Amino acid sequence: AALASRSNFYGWVLRGEALYQALQRFGVPIARDEQALARSCCFESFPHGITVALSPEIEVKAALKLEQRSALLERFGLALDGLSSIDWIDAAVCALAAQRIAKGAAAAIYGEPEGGLLVLPGRTRHTAVSTE
């Protein structure tokens, strides 16, 4: 944490940790198992993985992230108004995935309970997959 606080490069990690802590104070737990997704919880995800999962018809490339993620949002009927940077677009992509999973869409789960789960849209509902 000390090293991370000396560089803005890790700012998003520190803000994410602060958000997790704030949500826990309001009774929203961090997902530690696949059953957690059946109720309100917070979990980690990432926009590139979401774009790959929700865009199987294209080759997703990091160099085209702005264009491809914007197109993904538009395909799901979301307006890009006010999304003035890739960070806002990425946040909207993650919110789209979280909303779909909360409504019962399939999810792929990676990680271990003690470290938290990485959740992406998937082919089957709540498929636990170890990263080891």
Image (tube, rainbow, N blue to C red):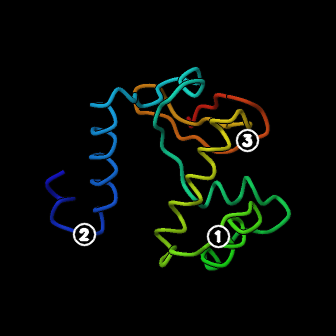
- Label 1 is placed on what type of residue? Ala
Count neighbours of disc 3 (C-alpha within 10 A) and say few if under 14, some if 14 to 19, many if 20 or more.
some
Q: Secondary structure at mark 2?
A: helix
Q: Report the residue marked by disc 2.
A: 8
Percent position of residue 109, x then y: 61, 35
Q: Secondary structure at mark 3?
A: loop
Sequence order check, earlier mark of 2 and 3: 2
Task: Work out how far the residue at label 3 is from the one at label 1, CA to CA, in angstroms.
Answer: 24 Å
**Residue at x 49% of width, y 29% of height:** 112
Residue 118 marker:
none
Q: Residue furthest top?
A: 35
- Label 2 is placed on what type of residue? Asn
Percent position of residue 122, x then y: 73, 41
**Quarter assignment of residue 10:** bottom left
Question: Which of the image's four quarters has the C terminus?
Answer: top right
Cβ atoms under marks 3 and 1 closer than 8 Å: no
Residue 79 marker:
1
- Label 3 is placed on what type of residue? Gly
Residue 122 marker:
3
